[in-house]
Amino acid sequence: MRPFRVKAVLFDFDGTLTEPGLLDFAEIGRAIGNPPGTQVLEYIETLADSGQQAEAFALLERFELEAAALSKPNEAAEETVGYLRTQGLALGIITRNSLTSVERALENFTGISAADFALIMTRDLPLPPKPAPDGIVEAARLLDVAVEEVMIVGDYTHDIEAGTRAGAVTVLLENRTANHLAHVSADFRISSLTELPDMVRLGLALPEGKLPNDLLQPFLAGLSPDASVLVGPALGEDAAVVAVEPGHGVVLKCDPITFATEELPTYALQVNANDVVSLGGVPRWYLATVLFPAGSTPSALLSLMEGIRDACAAMGISLCGGHTEITGAVTRPVVAGTMAGTAFSSTLVRKSTMRPGDHIILTKRLAVEGTALLAREMGEELLRRGIDPATLSAGRKLLSHIGVVAEARTAARCDGVSALHDITEGGLATASRELSAAGGWAVRLTHEHIPLYAETIEISRLLSLDPLGLIASGSLLIACRKDSAAPLLADLAAAGIEAVTIGVVLDEPAEATGTVHALRHGSPAPWPSFAVDEAARALAAALPSRSG
């Protein structure tokens, strides 16, 4: 796949937006008199007599209008055009047909009309028709986008050749039966317009945050690590385990901290350690790649590096290397850390051992990290909106609780624990789907059993956020056998760790990206999904006022 960006989509018309097969080009050719194997428009242009040309075009127009009167929207054509409009894309039609026939065919559409297209380019314009690239180049100019940002969708070789020659992104619509197009080289091939939104999405700007799971999962599924990888890349697996000798392994984890500005060293250590212990490992070694923006001073770099050193010492972790750099590629300090730890095969906690009937336990309350982050980064705004200063102060202090090392170690010692999962970006809404995907089973969660901090409730209310979508490092999801739940809860309580059962693993295979059902007071209830973490969304919305 080559990288691309889409700002406009141009559709061929016959056989693309309309059902294929209504125009019989062989019959048209016989009526007009062009030799077999030649194209109608190109043949008509060779006629020296203007009268013959006019007569030929009139015949062609008659055939087109007869077909237009009978035409129907192609499968999903109207729905696809409607969806693309919601994405803010400029849409157009580029066809070898006449404008009159296109407008007549669109009268048979109920969901879209000519008004849904920013331009309709037909043979009536003084431009050479496809496969010449001129129409696409002119369309890009009229739409005020680069031609490389145009996607051309068509069902015939002329469409793809024109798009390729123009430098556009090309999508060949095979209409489910197009073996005769096997030789056509397009960027993408689809059998139905129902697939087009997925192709377009690959060229749309992503929101800040993690790559969406439905885009990441197919890539991860295609990786094939060697046999030494005991726990490899998969949705819901946040670290890897590599065997170094029989019974012994190394847990490997890397995670950047890109938006936490306070207590960055401790933050960077803790979030990496969380995922190591969530596999039953012991964090041992840390490498830090530290990027500072241009204009930073030596004291700023050294202060941060000393903070990382001290945080490692406090956690019993060896700072054993990394990289430092001042670069215009970042606008604030970024710490990208790699944590390594030790593990025994016998003590690894593998999500693949989850089974129907397992209980799902949540430690602490939601959402430790998101609450602390918003209290620290948006304190002035929250005060302006009326938060009690004591509540704001308590929220800021939650940052000291983002570690899950203690609860993970307690859980790993309990027989019957089948999965540990640190709740990070996207909050419980996303983490529960990741747990389901990694374990292979659907899960059911009960809304009223999910505990929240009072500070989280108040900050979420004031900023109009959903706590289920707040980044939540500091809370651990634990899956365990039903008979192990009560002893585990007792062990956690004895260790001073708050925990509660919030759900159960169902006897239902999970979808590739995870399946979560929810109950509220005994009745089925929606389970939210977030394209962007709620904390990141709030911070992005506040950025203009914070920078101004």
Image (cartoon, rainbow, N blue to C red):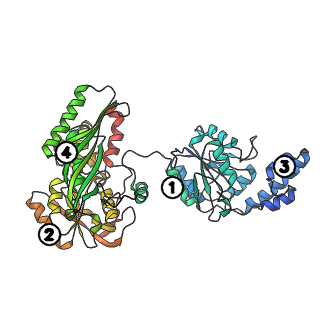
What is the distance, in whole Å, between disc 3 and disc 4 at their CAs?
Answer: 75 Å
> Is the residue marked by circle 1 packed among few (<14), some (14-19), or many (20+) residues within 10 Å?
few
What is the distance, in whole Å, between disc 3 and disc 2 at their CAs?
Answer: 84 Å
Q: Secondary structure at mark 4?
A: helix
What is the distance, in whole Å, between disc 4 and disc 1 at their CAs?
Answer: 38 Å
> Is the residue marked by circle 2 packed among few (<14), some (14-19), or many (20+) residues within 10 Å?
some
Instruction: Please name the residue that numbered disc 2 is placed on.
Output: 486
What is the distance, in whole Å, between disc 1 and disc 2 at their CAs?
Answer: 45 Å
Q: Is residue 458 visible?
A: no
Q: Secondary structure at mark 2?
A: helix
The disc label shown at residue 404, or none: none
Please name the residue shown 56% across and 42% down the image: 149
Q: Earlier in the sequence, mark 3 or mark 4?
A: 3
Q: Nearer the viewer, mark 3 or mark 4?
A: 3
> Is the residue marked by circle 3 packed among few (<14), some (14-19), or many (20+) residues within 10 Å?
many
Q: Earlier in the sequence, mark 3 or mark 2?
A: 3
What is the distance, in whole Å, between disc 4 and disc 2 at their CAs?
Answer: 29 Å
Instruction: Please name the residue that numbered disc 1 is placed on.
Output: 198
Quarter occupied by residue 463: top left
Say if 198 sits above or below 145 in the image. Answer: below
Instruction: Please name the residue that numbered disc 3 is placed on.
Output: 44
Q: Earlier in the sequence, mark 4 or mark 2?
A: 4
Q: Earlier in the sequence, mark 1 or mark 3?
A: 3
